[in-house]
Amino acid sequence: QSALTQPASVSGSPGQSITISCTGTSSDVGGFNSVSWYQQLPGKTPKLIIFAVDDRPSGVSSRFSGSKSGNTASLTISGLQAEDEADYYCLSFAGSSAPWVIGGGTKVTVL
Amino acid sequence: QVHLVQSGGEVKKPGASVEVSCKASGYSFMKYGITWVRQAPGQGLEWMGWINPYNRNTLYAHKVHHRVIMTTDTDRNTVYMELRGLRSDDTAVYYCARYDFDGRTFDYWGQGTPVTVSS
């Protein structure tokens, strides 16, 4: 299965909002409300920040929000902070035979 | 508290096999799946496969399906991932993660196991 498409990098100034897109197909992102987002700080393990398109696990900041339109999911980080500088990955369920596809990752830089 | 603890790093020669373990605690082991994801140096995440400890059903990514085997020991709450015929491009950090069926997401991750393939 093909990876989901994410921009290689996104940057913003402290306090700004940024949005990361994750484009798939009708067989994955568009077909299921099962998109997750992960934050990976440098040298660390990925951390779940959004699941089921727009749900946040307990303890995750409300500055992170998710949405989906058609075959594209999005992660928005509002009130950007220096600690948000990390790699972000999207993951989508893609059906029972080839269940999960992962995006190529987006590096977020806080200017 | 959910914990996934993986075995330590490995160095292997090309053609060899490696087995990485993932011991779960803090939840009902049979009610969640375990998935494996790897990350080559400086690269993104790559899904490798999944096992359901309840019925031992497995699904493997097409890229590795002929070389990988995932098994489970329900007495030890442990999942094992064996990768055979190692190549240099298998050099990566291998992560196990818990799969939540309801949320269809990988919610808790192990600390990662670095595997280096080098002659």
Image: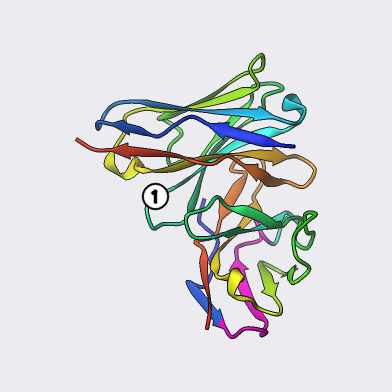
Q: Is residue A92 above or below residue A12?
A: above
Q: Residue at x 55, y 70 (%)?
A: A85
Residue A92 position in % (x across, y down): 65, 54
- Find numbered disc 1 in the image and state the secondary structure of the residue it sits on: loop
Specify the color scheme: rainbow
Q: Which residues are magenta?
A: A12-29
Residue type highlighted by circle 1: Ala
Residue A76 position in % (x across, y down): 69, 74
Instruction: Tell which of A71 and B84 is nearer to you.
Output: B84
For the image, the number of numbered tags is 1
Q: Residue at x 80, y 59 (%)?
A: A55
Q: Is residue B20 left or right of residue B35?
A: left
Q: Main secondary structure of the magenta part?
A: loop
Snapshot quadrant of residue A67: bottom right
Snapshot quadrant of residue A90: bottom right
- Image quadrant occupied by the C terminus of chain B: top left
- Image quadrant occupied by the N terminus of chain B: top right
Residue A111 position in % (x across, y down): 52, 83
Q: Is residue A6 left or right of residue B18?
A: right
Instruction: Tell which of B35 and B4 is nearer to you.
Output: B4
**Where does label 1 land, which residue?**
B40
Q: Is residue A59 magenta?
A: no
Q: Residue at x 60, y 67 (%)?
A: A22
Q: Is residue A4 above or below residue A82?
A: above
Mark 1 is surrounded, within 10 Å at the Cα level, by few (under 14), some (14 to 19) or many (20 or more) other residues, namely: some
Q: Is residue A15 magenta?
A: yes
Snapshot quadrant of residue B25: top right
